[in-house]
Image (cartoon, rainbow, N blue to C red):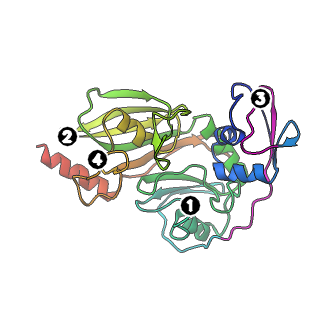
């Protein structure tokens, strides 16, 4: 598969950064590998990852046949919200990593999907991320979209790039939000000194927009709903922390101690996922019920504020 892109407003950017933004469903390391192996050319010539783009450059990307998957299929139970020949929607539990990575080569959602789907997953994202169109953090629960073939993957990744996929999350944050609704429109990029974190103070942050509305107030905490216009890494966690209301349980962007000891990571749930089905062309929408830990927490908060 080939793709052609003409450089316009992105002149001056490194080509690996440019491609990671243009092809948001592919990992930057995967794209750098393509550049290194000369599958990426500018005006017909191979370049290095550090190449700075010039206005009018024609970038061509050739995607070779995906490598044979060698990640083990594992019989791990899945909470499936919907499945057909093209897509599968999974309700991901807490503490489950989406795809294999250093330190997590087993027990991931991909390991479970390989067993359930019998290797029938799209190969666009390489051997470590078969079928994966988008990700949610290990401690975030809820709906996740997976594609079974490359045609479906290309359609859904295109919708993701155009910000047309409807994604709604629910969360509990520290503090009492002043307004019932709000919009956070602040770019997000890699933290300037702590490279594992994201930040609204990044020098070259990318557009990030989050809409929120209050569902319930508990004095020191607020139960909110968030709708994403964009899908940056840790977007809701970073945005809510940036306005002084980090997510409850988020030890990375919030207080280092959680007032509820049984929580494992941020209180964040991907509730709603809506998109145009790649085969039927019709809008479909799926909802993942709140996990027990979340409903138990809400019950405790309601009792404490009576």
Quick one: 141 or 46, which is closer to the camera?
46
The disc, 1 or 3, on the residue closer to the chain's N-terminal end is 3
Q: Is residue 166 left or right of residue 73?
A: left
Q: Position of residue 223 (x, y in %)?
A: 29, 41
CB atoms of marks 1 and 2 within 8 Å: no
The disc, 3 or 2, on the residue closer to the chain's N-terminal end is 3
Q: Is residue 223 left or right of residue 68?
A: left
Query: Which residues, given as a range, are shown in magenta?
Result: 47-70
Q: Which residue is mark 4?
A: 255
Label 3: how many Cα within 10 Å (few below 14, some 14–19, many 20+): some
Q: Which of label 3 and label 2 is nearer to you? A: 3
| Residue positioned most to the right | 44
**In the image, residue 92 above or below residue 193:** below
Q: Position of residue 216 (x, y in %)?
A: 25, 38
The disc, 4 or 2, on the residue closer to the chain's N-terminal end is 2
As helix, strand or loop, the secondary structure at mark 4 comes to loop
Q: Which of label 4 and label 2 is nearer to you? A: 4
As helix, strand or loop, the secondary structure at mark 3 comes to loop
Q: Which residue is mark 2?
A: 220
**Real-space CA distance between mark 1 and mark 4, rounded to the nearest whole angstrom:** 28 Å
Label 2: how many Cα within 10 Å (few below 14, some 14–19, many 20+): few
Label 1: how many Cα within 10 Å (few below 14, some 14–19, many 20+): many
**Real-space CA distance between mark 3 and mark 2, rounded to the nearest whole angstrom:** 51 Å
Is residue 58 visible in the rendered structure shown here?
yes
| Residue positioned most to the left | 306
Q: Which residue is mark 1?
A: 99
Question: What residue is rendered at 42% in x and 47% in y?
Answer: 271
**Real-space CA distance between mark 3 and mark 4, rounded to the nearest whole angstrom:** 44 Å
Question: What residue is rendered at 29% in x and 26% in y?
Answer: 179
Label 4: how many Cα within 10 Å (few below 14, some 14–19, many 20+): some
Is residue 152 visible in the rendered structure shown here?
no
């Amino acid at each position: 598969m080939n793709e052609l892109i003409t450089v316009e407003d992105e002149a001056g950017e490194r080509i690996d950064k440019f491609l990671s933004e243009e092809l948001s469903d592919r990992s930057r390391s995967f794209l750098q590998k393509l550049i290194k192996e000369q599958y990426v050319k500018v005006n017909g010539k191979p370049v290095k990852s550090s190449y700075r783009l010039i206005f009018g450059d024609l970038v061509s990307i050739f995607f070779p046949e995906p490598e044979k998957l060698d990640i083990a299929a594992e019989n791990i139970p899945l909470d499936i919200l919907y499945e057909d020949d093209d897509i599968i929607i999974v309700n991901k539990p807490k503490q489950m990593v989406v795809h294999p990575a250093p330190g997590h080569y087993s027990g991931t959602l991909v390991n479970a999907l390989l067993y359930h789907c019998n290797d029938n997953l799209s190969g666009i994202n390489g051997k470590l991320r078969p079928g994966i169109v988008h990700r949610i953090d290990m401690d975030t629960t809820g709906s996740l979209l997976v594609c079974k073939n490359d045609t479906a993957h290309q359609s859904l990744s295109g919708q993701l790039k155009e910000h047309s996929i409807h994604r709604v999350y629910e969360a509990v944050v520290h503090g009492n939000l002043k307004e019932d609704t709000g919009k956070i429109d602040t770019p997000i990029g890699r933290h300037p000194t702590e490279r594992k974190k994201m930040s609204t103070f990044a020098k070259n942050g990318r557009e990030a927009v989050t809409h929120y509305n209050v569902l319930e107030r508990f004095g020191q905490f607020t139960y909110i709903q968030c709708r994403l216009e964009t899908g940056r890494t840790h977007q809701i966690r970073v945005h809510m922390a940036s306005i002084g209301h980090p997510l409850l349980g988020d030890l990375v962007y919030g207080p280092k101690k959680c007032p509820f000891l049984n929580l494992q990571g941020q209180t964040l749930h991907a509730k709603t996922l809506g998109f145009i089905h790649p085969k039927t062309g019709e809008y479909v929408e799926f909802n993942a019920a709140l996990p027990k830990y979340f409903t138990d927490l809400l019950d405790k908060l309601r009792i404490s504020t009576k």
